[in-house]
């Protein structure tokens, strides 16, 4: 059976991985640099798949999924290092979108 991990499970898994090393989490500025680096790699892959810039034959194959995974890992590291519960952060942002921004976009008509 394939059990799904909660965001809290994922944060704990990343924390257990990082906690085995003396270096621990990077500093906030280093973490931000890592996030920026990973976002750039994701942008490069998206540009290769959907943009006008095909990969060079010498470039290794990566996927958008792989780059999103790298970005997610660093984001979780950043959140963990700052003691941020990503489930709470998500709940807050969804509340904001469902209240403040509830009429911002054109809703799809319900099918009858």
Image (tube, helix red, strand yellow):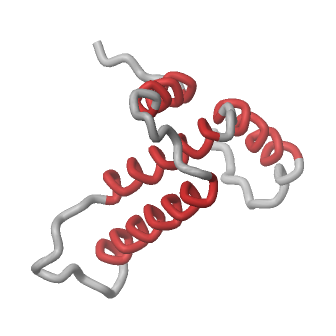
> Count of labels shown?
0
Residue at 53 percent of width and 49 percent of height: 26
Query: In this picture, is 5 found above or below 112?
Result: above
Query: In this picture, is 83 found above or below 47?
Result: above
* Residue toward you, 20 or 62: 20
The image shows residue 81 at horizontal and vertical percentages of: 61, 39
- To which quarter of the image does residue 52 belong? bottom left
The image shows residue 34 at horizontal and vertical percentages of: 49, 60
* Residue toward you, 106 or 41: 41
Q: Is residue 78 left or right of residue 21?
A: right
Check the picture and name the quadrant holding the N terminus.
top left
| The furthest residue to the top | 1
The image shows residue 58 at horizontal and vertical percentages of: 11, 78
Residue at 63 percent of width and 53 percent of height: 28
Q: Is residue 104 left or right of residue 107?
A: right
- To which quarter of the image does residue 37 belong? bottom left
* Residue toward you, 63 or 77: 77
The image shows residue 40 at horizontal and vertical percentages of: 44, 70
Check the picture and name the quadrant holding the C terminus.
top right
| The furthest residue to the front | 22
Residue at 46 percent of width and 53 percent of height: 71
| The furthest residue to the bottom | 52
| The furthest residue to the left | 57
- To which quarter of the image does residue 2 belong? top left
Q: Is residue 7 left or right of residue 69?
A: right
């Amino acid at each position: 059976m394939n059990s799904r991990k909660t965001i809290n499970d994922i944060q704990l898994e990343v924390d257990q991985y990082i906690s085995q090393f003396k270096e621990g989490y990077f500093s906030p500025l280093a973490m931000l640099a890592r996030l920026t680096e990973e976002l750039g790699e994701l942008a490069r892959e998206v540009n290769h798949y959907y943009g006008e810039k095909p990969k060079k034959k010498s470039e290794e194959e990566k996927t958008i999924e792989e780059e999103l995974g790298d970005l997610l890992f660093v984001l979780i590291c950043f959140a963990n290092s700052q003691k941020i519960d990503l489930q709470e952060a998500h709940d807050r942002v969804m509340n904001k979108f469902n209240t403040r921004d509830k009429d911002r976009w054109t809703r799809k008509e319900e099918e009858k």
